[in-house]
Amino acid sequence: MGRLSFLIKWHQLHKPLKFLILLLVLFSSERDVVLGSGSDRSALLELKDSISDPYGVLTSWNLNNRDHCLWAGVLSMPFNELSGYIPVEIWGMEKLEVLDLEGNLISGSLPSQFKGLKILKVLNLGFNEIFGGMPSSLLNCMGLQILNLAGNQVNGSIPRFIGEFRNLRGLYLSFNLLGGSIPGDVWDNCGKLEHLELAGNFFTGSIPKSLGKCRGLKTLLLNNFGGAIPSDLGNCTMLSVLVLSNLWDPLPNISSFRSDISTEKLALIADEYNLYEGTIPAEITSLSSLRMVWAPRATLDGKLPDSWGFCANLEMLNLAQNYYSGKVSEGLATARNCIFLT
Ligand SMILES: *[C@@H]1O[C@H](CO)[C@@H](O)[C@H](O)[C@H]1NC(C)=O
Ligand SMILES: *[C@@H]1O[C@H](CO)[C@@H](O)[C@H](O)[C@H]1NC(C)=O
Ligand SMILES: *[C@@H]1O[C@H](CO)[C@@H](O)[C@H](O)[C@H]1NC(C)=O
């Protein structure tokens, strides 16, 4: 099927649309919008009725366009001013592969039951106003590769079913109201996981060793943890960005990201405490893939690690306000690319 023939960047067209959804629909070469058959099709037609469409982009959605082999597999309109709830029809869609509504004002909770989205690969609802827990209904989307709920008010704890998404490449849950500890026994199948972002929550406990099983991990963002930093993370030989504390966090700069970020969240960041024990193990600091290690005010102590993977790629190292003693290692002197060292 020749889907994904071309895409319209809806955010370039945007003006405040009152409710819902811009659809990044796939057009055939004749520019007929081609809807899926059956329920997806009627779901989209129902949607069309409830959408304010000042540019008439959805005009060609009509009952005369039936039974093409193309369908709307991508629904994407990040960084608009869409508000309201995700219409319930969306959760029944069968052929949707990408649902991307990042950076809007979508509210509501994720439905505890839905039937569709069985082939969804990307669920991106980051930086909206989603609240409530992560329901197990998400398991419908067994093929998820990207799950981004960062910057919402998602609460509860990280569910164990996360371990069942074997194709997950990115799990972005930073800046929510999540608590509890990170389950240790769900990382057996995380071989494809590249980005795990959990900073800016209320987690407790220590970093599970078992994260070392995620051999492909490139980005790990955590904070508010304690205990020893497991040397097993050194098994993640691709690890490039390691954030252990969120103070003076340049990645992301959430105050510029969203001006309306809640004061609660900013307070959360200001009140952050990290109570790690010991130092960052040499198994981690010697990784030559490291580009950034960010761990200010993290109660790290002992001798400053002296193996820094030849520092070939190290660009940022922030170990400010810890309890390190001893000399700055000679290894660091070779950090030629380091632009921020404190
Ligand atoms: C999560 O948030 C929902 C909705 O705001 C609330 O009803 C529920 O009690 C919260 N659950 C927890 C565990 O805090
Ligand atoms: C990391 O590698 C070491 C040495 O090969 C091994 O003993 C350890 O079990 C590994 N850890 C994980 C979590 O895979
Ligand atoms: C983050 O964004 C705010 C607001 O735009 C800006 O004032 C601040 O300097 C930025 N911080 C960094 C570290 O870039």
Image: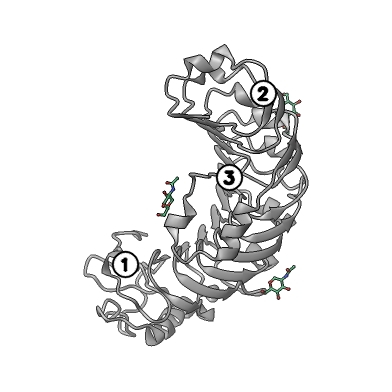
Number of on-image labels:
3
Dot 2 lies on which element? helix
Q: Dot 3 surroundings within 10 Å: few (below 14), some, or many (20 or more)?
A: many
Foreground label between 3 and 1: 3
Q: Quadrant of residue 26?
A: bottom left
Distance between the alpha carbons at the discs numbered 2 and 1: 45 Å
Q: What residue is shown with label 2?
A: 283
Disc 3 from disc 1: Cα separation: 35 Å
Q: Which residue is rendered at x = 61% and y = 66% of the image?
A: 153
Q: Amino acid at mark 1?
A: Trp
- Residue 247 position in % (x across, y down): 58, 45
Element under disc 3: loop
**Element under disc 1:** helix
**Residue 52: x and y, percent?**
34, 83
Say few, some or many: other residues with alpha carbon within 10 Å of mark 1 (under 14 / 14 to 19 / 20 or more): some
- Identify the mark nearer the N-term, 2 or 1: 1
Quadrant of the image where one finds ligand 1? bottom right
Q: Is mark 2 within 8 Å of ligand 2?
A: no
Residue type for callout 2: Glu
User: What is the quadrant of the N terminus in the image?
Assistant: bottom left
Tell me if label 2 and label 3 are in contact, CB under 8 Å: no
- 48 vs 195, left or right, is left
Q: Name the residue rendered at 30%, 71% in the picture.
A: 14
In front: 279, or 30?
279
The residue positioned 39% from the left and 72% from the top of the image is 81
206 lies above or below 320: below
Residue located beneath label 3 in the image: 247
Quarter occupied by residue 113: bottom right
Q: Which one is earlier in the sequence, the residue at label 3 or at label 1?
A: 1
Classify residue 82 as left or right of residue 108: left
